[in-house]
Amino acid sequence: MISNVYQGGFDASWELDLFGGTRRSAEAADAQLAAAGFSRFDVQVTLVAEVARNYTAARSFQRRLAIAQQNLKAQREVVALARDRSRQGLISSLEPEQAATVLAQTEAQVPALEYGLQASIHHLGVLLGQLPGTLLVELAAPAPIPAVPPQVPAGLPSDLLLRRPDIRMAERQLAAATAQIGIATADLFPKFSLTGNLGTQSANSGNLFTPGSSTWSVGPAFQWRIFDAGRIRAHIRVQNARQEEALAGYEKTVLLGFEDVENALVAYAKEQARNVPLGAAVASSRKSLEISRDQYANGLTSFLNVLDAERSLYQAQDSLVQSDQAVAQDLIALYKALGGGWEEPGAALVPARPKV
């Protein structure tokens, strides 16, 4: 005999979290979500620092090119003057060749500087999600290297390091690993739940939703993996080991963060100290060149002293620009080491202490 039964409904189950397994699962998920957010913030800080670093490099190459062009103009004038005096028999043919050598050495540096400028602009465009050559026209006009503050606030509090996204991410990963221990431990205990079912059932589809066709059931459920105790305890030991690994990683990240900040502070201060005598060297080299040219014109010194003064001035100017670039980039490195700046972070930026 064939008969038809029509039924519909739904059921639900609610586990009683008596031993904290569900709560710890929620904690682990929240910590992993927060770690992913800090990872994204880490990428943002790195991107901002790289954009600033490449922009500073581009402006530095522009300034170095301008200095090279200025020196080339002066050196060409010196070569022309030396050749003219040589044709008049006032000096030997050696001096024009010496001047031409200095000129050629300066000219040989220009292509490398032009490459560095274009490469910096190309990389800057890529960092901004554009084609490499997009910013060549926009950045063609020379501009100074961005100015930097003479100093950053001294005595930075150690809590400032906690704004570093890598430290905050490591702390959340440690919290997630700790919560995993609680999840594994909860499996040692029985699980209690309430299950229920509500629906309709009828041999005739037309009567499926009549009051007499309603069905329901409710009752407790009990589950205990008593014969898996050995496997559960082994899993707990695994989670403990992972938590210890996460703790070691957190401690390492904090120590490296302190190291990065200290190195960045020292580099910034020392480069500023180096920048001052380099500026003095440029001023004295320029004065030496003026004196040597005057003395040479009056026959009081050799042409070689003029060439040495020109070479020294160019090297001093180029070194000063590179130092200006290094000061700016050391400040950028400090910005990155502190996780996005050195202002005192708000309470919302400071993550919770590790739950060990």
Image: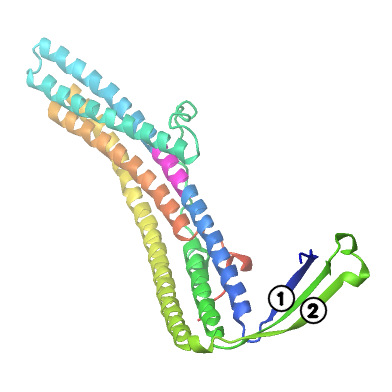
Under mark 2, the amino acid is Ser
Image quadrant containing the N terminus: bottom right
320 versus 292 height, above or below: below
Q: Relative to the observer, which residue lies in front, 177 or 79?
A: 177
Mark found first going from the N terminus, 2 or 1: 1
Q: How much space separates mark 2 and mark 1, taking CA atoms?
A: 12 Å
- Would you say residue 54 sits in the magenta stretch? yes
Label 1 element class: strand
- Would you say residue 259 sits in the magenta stretch? no
Image disc number at residue 13:
1
Q: Are marks 2 and 1 in contact (CB under 8 Å)?
A: no
Inspect this view and state whether residue 115 appears.
yes
Q: Residue at x 29, y 41 (%)?
A: 319
> In the picture, residue 132 is in which quadrant?
top left
The span shown in magenta is 49-59
Under mark 1, the amino acid is Ser
Q: Residues within 10 Å of mark 2 (few under 14, many from 20)?
A: few
Q: Residue at x 19, y 29 (%)?
A: 105
Q: Relative to the observer, which residue lies in front, 356 or 220?
A: 220
Instruction: Name the chief secondary structure element in magenta.
Output: helix
Residue 27 at x, y percent in the picture: 60, 74
29 versus 272 height, above or below: below
Q: Nearer the viewer, mark 2 or mark 1?
A: 2
Q: Residues within 10 Å of mark 1 (few under 14, many from 20)?
A: some
Inspect this view and state whether residue 354 appears.
no
Image disc number at residue 217:
2
Q: Residue at x 59, y 74 (%)?
A: 25
Image disc number at residue 171:
none
